[in-house]
Image: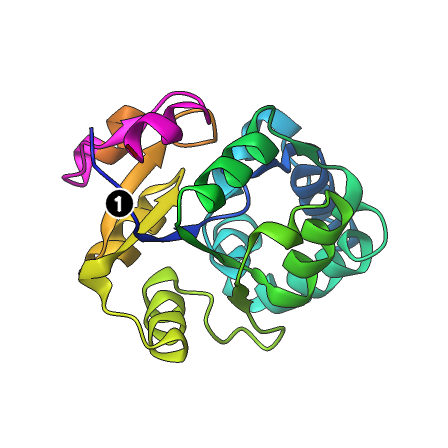
Amino acid sequence: MLELTKRTLFFDLDGTLTDPQQGITRCIQFALRELQIVAPKQQQLTWCIGPPLRESFVQLAGENKADAAVEFYRQRFSTIGLYENALYPEIPHVLQELRGRGHSLFVASSKPRVFVERILQHFELAQYFDAVYGSELDGRLQDKGELLAYALAAEKRQGGDCVMIGDRHHDALGAANNGMDFVGVLYGFGSAKEFTANGFRNWVERPMELLEAAL
């Protein structure tokens, strides 16, 4: 298991700190219906949780309708979908313990930062993080590698001193592109198969195991 002693830890949001399945999938369905496209069932849309939103809509609605789909998605997400979300059990305890052990904690999410901050405040998690990094509403910094590079520069940190914790291979690849260690979480929306297919083999099955990894 990867040792995380006194490291700088970057957490993904969706699928790592909270379970956003209801909100994200319902907002995707809403956007597709607004575009008069037959929407898949919610369980058929979980693959959209994690990757940049526009990339998912390119596959679901086509390149020409992707931007409009993002706008419709945000109409619902900003008022309703944002709160169709659930905190993973153990997360507050894990964050409190990691802070107490001397780690520096940050959030790095492909979701727009304005939404990330509202979600963290809603679940009373903001207090555990030194700073929050997310994409911009115009699409900048949606790529996890670019986002982490931006965050590392802003915090004046070296990638080799930091760890990315997330549930999808986008998180792992973003970490690798910045020389960071990576710990995958299997309680989110990724899988061991997804991680190993991309050459990553460090993961935990529940939030509490992050404390073992931090010894």
Position of 137 relative to 128 (above/below): below
Other residues around mark 1 within 10 Å, as few (<14) / some (14–19) / many (≥20): many
* Residue 65: quadrant of the picture: bottom right
Residue 213 located within the stretch drawn in magenta: yes
| Residue nearest the observer in this picture, 192 or 159 | 159
| Residue nearest the observer in this picture, 180 or 82 | 180
Q: Position of residue 145 (x, y in %)?
A: 32, 64
Three-letter amino acid code of the residue under disc 1: Phe
* Residue 205: quadrant of the picture: top left
In this view of the protein, can residue 178 be seen by the observer? no
Q: Which residue is mark 1?
A: 182
Residue 80 vs residue 154: left or right? right
Q: Position of residue 183 (x, y in %)?
A: 29, 39
Q: Position of residue 95 (x, y in %)?
A: 52, 40
Position of 35 relative to 37 (above/below): below
Q: Residue at x 59, y 77 (%)?
A: 138
Q: Position of residue 113 (x, y in %)?
A: 61, 66
Residue 78 vs residue 24: left or right? right
Residue 168 vs residue 183: left or right? right
Q: Residue at x 54, y 73 (%)?
A: 139
Q: Quadrant of the N terminus?
A: top left
Position of 21 relative to 204 (above/below): below
Tell me, what colour scheme is on the image?
A: rainbow
Residue 115 vs residue 190: left or right? right
| Residue nearest the observer in this picture, 108 or 96 | 96
Q: Residue at x 58, y 53 (%)?
A: 61
Q: Quadrant of the C terminus?
A: top left
